[in-house]
Each structure stands twice: as structure tokens, then as C-alpha cells.
Amino acid sequence: MVEAYVLIQTEVGRAEVVAKQLASLAGVVSAEYVTGPYDVVLRVSADTLEALRADVVPSVQQVAGITRTLTCPIASGT
């Protein structure tokens, strides 16, 4: 199992709506709208890094109102 955080910038005033839409997508573990340089923070998971890159991240990027994403795979210490 591979997990990552996806940091998302949205159009002004769209963070809450985007977070709610993202929460229902396959592979999304959690979706929170936040303050700061990013508007939404997701935790996502997939069976492999390739599946994360090919399936989960593109579905996230297709949600209306997103202007930029940054995917940060979680480095497991085990």
C-alpha cells in the first residue's frame, strides 16, 4: 500500500466545495480544507505507486476549481 498527501490550490472561495467533491473519489482517505498556502489537503492511497500516479492523482486533478496540485508520497520508516 502506498499513501501520499496531495496539496491543492483552488480558485478563490472554492476550497470547501472542492474538498467535499474530492472526499467521494476512489483512493481518497481524507480531504480537509485548510488555511495557508494550500487550500485543500488530501491523504490518498493505492496498491502501488504506479496506480497512485495513473489512477488516483489524475482523478483528483479533474475536479473543477483546482488550479494546482503537489503530490507528496509518504516515506515509510519501516
Image (cartoon, rainbow, N blue to C red):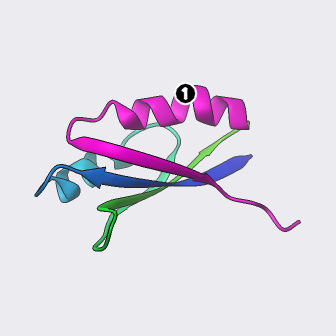
Q: Is residue 48 left or right of residue 23?
A: right
Q: Is residue 18 left or right of residue 77?
A: left
User: Farthest residue in the left direction?
Assistant: 13
Q: Nearer the viewer, residue 39 or 59?
A: 39
Q: Is residue 6 magenta?
A: no
Q: Residue at position x 24%, y 51% from top?
A: 10
Q: Is residue 53 magenta?
A: yes
Q: Nearer the viewer, residue 47 or 52?
A: 52
Q: Quadrant of residue 5?
A: bottom right
Q: Nearer the viewer, residue 68 or 53?
A: 68
Query: What percent of the width, then of the height, locates residue 49?
Result: 71, 37
| Quadrant position of the C terminus in the picture | bottom right
Does 27 appear above or below 30?
A: above
Q: Residue at position x 20%, y 58% from top?
A: 16
Query: What percent of the width, then of the height, locates residue 29?
Result: 51, 53
Q: Residue at position x 21%, y 57% from top?
A: 15
User: Farthest residue in the top direction?
Assistant: 54
Q: Is residue 45 left or right of residue 8?
A: right
* Magenta region: 49-78
Q: Quadrant of residue 13?
A: bottom left
Does 14 appear above or below 76?
A: above
Residue type at numbered disc 1: Asp
Q: Is residue 67 left or right of residue 51?
A: left
Which residue has dot 1 on it? Answer: 55
